[in-house]
Image (tube, helix red, strand yellow):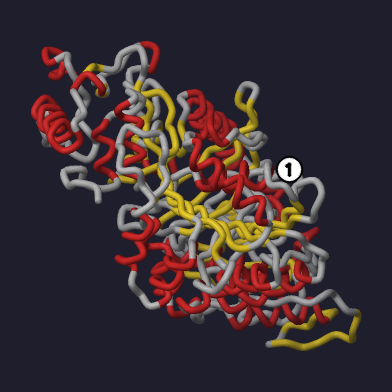
Amino acid sequence: MFSFFKRQASEPIQVGGVKTESRREHEIAQSLTLHSGPASVAGPGEPADNDSIVESLSAIPEYTSILTGVGNGFLVALPKHLEFAIMALEVGPKRALLYFDGKSNSADLPKAVQSVRNELVIGGFDVAANDRMCTEDLIRKLVEDFKKRPAYLGQSASNSEHKKTFETWISLAWQEGASDLHVLPSGNTSSVLIRVDGELEPLPDGHGGIYTESHANAVIGWAFGETAQENSNSAAMFGSSENIFAMLTPLQVGNTVVGMRFQTIIGVQGPKIIIRLYDANQTAIPLDQLGYSDSQIELLVEAGMKEKGLVLFCGVTGSGKTVAQKTFIETHPSNGVGAIYSLEDPIELPLEGVHQIPFQRDLADPEASSREFNLHVSSIVRADLDGVLIGEIRDAASAAAAMQFQSTGHFVVSTLHANKLSGIARRLTEEKSWGLTRAEITGPEVLNLMIYQGLVPRLCPKCKISGTETEAHKDVAVRKRAKKVDPAKEISTTLDILSRNFGLSADRFYFRRAGGCPHCKGRGTRGRTSVAEMFMPDETWLQLTSVGDDIGAHKHYRSFSDGDIESPDMTGKTILEHTLYKAALGIVDPRECRQFDGFEKQFK
């Protein structure tokens, strides 16, 4: 982690042979000297060491190409704000020199220079050990001159094509109702996939979402280099050597402004790209429209009325936690009459009535991230607050902040990756580095409300197949989690279990049709609905949980259930039972229950 201070006037400082004019230049030069790569033997036209700040063209050695810049006309794409702060020159076959602007005010600069070095080394370049300081004007002159060369102009013309391709990907994905876009490398090709109603499918671009790997990487390189929002990106540029994430500049698609959260995962075939898509101007969706039952909505309203304690929205990735959290916080009784703050990494959705504070974790330096996070927490504590939204409890700093805010009598809303209600206490305390104990989380009024939720596809009302249409069962879609299962046999088994265990007849249920219809664009589903289990901890549950009796605590929660699978009252019921209730209404395929649990067992 590189640390910087405000520029201060000072006498010239000598660092590693580099004569600098200010404390700021000294710090950058020192950082880059400490992080430069292994030494290389100097070649013709290449100075042996960095003994001065290069200011004139005459001091630049002969070169064949500029390797860095904004856009895909360069080997290594830079973010726009560093376009004239870094320059890599090719001074011979696979030999490179790195220059940087020592007067740059960007805190990204040292990390970006190191990233450029890494990408060049990965590309087979021998990079000189000492990075050279020069002026921004000099880099600008050289880059602008290089852009006039025929070799660059041919590449630059393709930039508009990369822009067009990326925007086409996003537009097609959004028009199909996708929540995510994936770019998956495999050998010399890359597949562009979209997630619609919970399942991945090829991008409908006319050729199955298949591109050459180099083309796909060029498109993604353009998107990251040109649209990554400053102060949201974990890396200065797109590359294959590290996992990176960023928020991209929203794109207008029809009447919607589409927000994009960008992430890469390194792999043996190359980085996989995942882009989360969402309506950047989305308004709060009413709780009943999200899919909660009346009894669950009553709990959410009651939790808001308490105005203290911790409200946790839990679930796996893509379970609707962020959207539900937005509705809860925007309809909270304190919204509009109290001071509510949020601390989010990253900020995805605008929250009406909330002062949103962005925070970016540095995965390479978690200690520095924790210090920065704690500074934000300290500021909020002194800011006459009523409540706080913490984007996600994911480490010791965020866990401690949640406990600190609730302990001072404020309400706290956050998300947590946990499995079922019965796993929330274990998730909060099993990470020893978080420092939370069962005694701490089960204290009086610490936990206000716990929600575990998921999203399941809604059946298309035009083409769903009734459980009594035995002749049509051959046309039922195969579940994505049971590709080798005969769907007709699976339906027969499912209906038998539902009848035997719950007394529910076949005419209550409907199944997804393979190939769908025009109304659902051939999917058999249209949108998704929330299913959930919720509990407002009472004294008995807290006592059982405090001593580690999670099974006993779960049985206590279940004791509030009316035991009627056809009842809309979800008090004390599991997420599987909520899914099964919606299946009995013909809203979802009953086979979706299996993603949460096996429904062969009796509920007790």
Q: Could you say which is closer to the camera, residue 507 or residue 131?
A: 507
Q: Could you say which is closer to the camera, residue 599 or residue 553?
A: 553
Which three-letter amino acid code belongs to the residue tagged 1? Answer: Glu
Give coordinates of residue 509: x percent, y percent.
Answer: 25, 23
Residue 413 seen in the figure: yes
In this picture, residue 104 sits left or right of residue 315: right
In this picture, residue 427 sits left or right of residue 138: left
In this picture, residue 101 sits left or right of residue 574: right
Q: Quadrant of the N terminus?
A: bottom right
The residue depicted at 70 percent of the width and 64 percent of the height is: 410
The residue depicted at 59 percent of the width and 32 percent of the height is: 160
Measured along the vertical axis of the image, is residue 549 above or below residue 224?
A: below
The residue depicted at 91 percent of the width and 80 percent of the height is: 9
Measured along the vertical axis of the image, is residue 424 above or below residue 577?
A: below
In this picture, residue 279 sits left or right of residue 424: right
Measured along the vertical axis of the image, is residue 479 above or below residue 31?
A: above
Give coordinates of residue 51: x percent, y percent.
Answer: 72, 82
Give coordinates of residue 197: x percent, y percent.
Answer: 39, 32
Callout 1: helix, strand or loop? Answer: loop
When asked about the image quadrant of residue 575, the answer is top left
Give coordinates of residue 301: x percent, y percent.
Answer: 61, 45
Q: Could you say which is closer to the camera, residue 541 or residue 394?
A: 541
The residue depicted at 41 percent of the width and 55 percent of the height is: 265
Residue 72 seen in the figure: no
When asked about the image quadrant of residue 235, the answer is bottom right
Q: Which residue is mark 1?
A: 352
Crowd around label 1: few <14 · some 14–19 · many ≥20 (10 Å): some
